[in-house]
Amino acid sequence: MNEGRNVFVGILAIILGIIIIIFPLVGIVTLSVLTGVGIIFIGLWLLLQSFKKWKNSFAAGIMDLFLAIFAFLVGIVFLGNVAAFEFLSFLGLYLVGFFLILAGLEALFSGKDMKARGIGILGFALGIIYLVLGSYVIHPLFLSAIMGAFLIIAGIMEIFIKSKEVPKEE
């Protein structure tokens, strides 16, 4: 019944997206924590995607795995060290946009069906929007909304759009 769909990953992405959108943004400590949590959530999504893609494309699975590990490490630094976040705050905005763009490009180029390509285009476009808005928007609530929207839309696509199974080439 759920062939070609990943309901668990979809529900998890939706929950993580909602958490990112509704979490209150108060002060630099909260912003540091939210950026760290947001990057860790993107890392978690990339980790789950790496296991999903491992069967069809070893290279795509490895790329997602490395991106997930890097996202976890950067997220932990922002969670645990507010001074590092303050020093690198301008990079923090660009890192999240960068992760969205990389996740989008990876999904776009490794995807074999319309759903994967749709998630790829969505991630790439929202990453570009995130970078542009990050340069001009003073309040980070808009940026959290973009990150959360990506996870929610990707989760909905995971649940409701059936992907075509592409036979593994041997």
Image (spheres, helix red, strand yellow):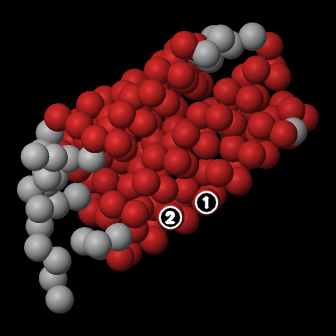
Residue topped by disc 1: 69
Q: Is residue 100 above or below residue 130?
A: below
In terms of image quadrants, where is residue 158?
top left
Amino acid residing under circle 2: Leu
Distance CA(mark 1)–CA(mark 2): 6 Å
The residue lying at 35 percent from left, 76 percent from top is: 58
Front position in the image: 109 or 8: 8
Circles 1, 2 touching at the beta carbon (< 8 Å): yes
Which residue is tagged 2? 65
Residue nearest the observer in this picture, 7 or 150: 7
Instruction: Name the residue nearer the viewer: 124 or 159.
Output: 159
Q: Relative to residue 110, is residue 88 drawn left or right?
A: right
Judge the density around disc 2: few (<14), some (14-19), many (≥20) Cα neighbours within 10 Å: many
User: What percent of the width, then of the height, locates residue 123?
Assistant: 36, 40
**Secondary structure state at the residue bearing disc 1:** helix
Q: Residue 143 appears at what percent x and percent y? A: 54, 22
Question: Residue at 76% of width from left, 29% of height from top?
Answer: 32
Of the residues shown, which amino acid type is indicated by label 1?
Ile
Residue 76 in the image, given as x and y percentages of width and height: 74, 46
Q: Along the line of sight, which residue is nearer the eye, 54 or 91? A: 54
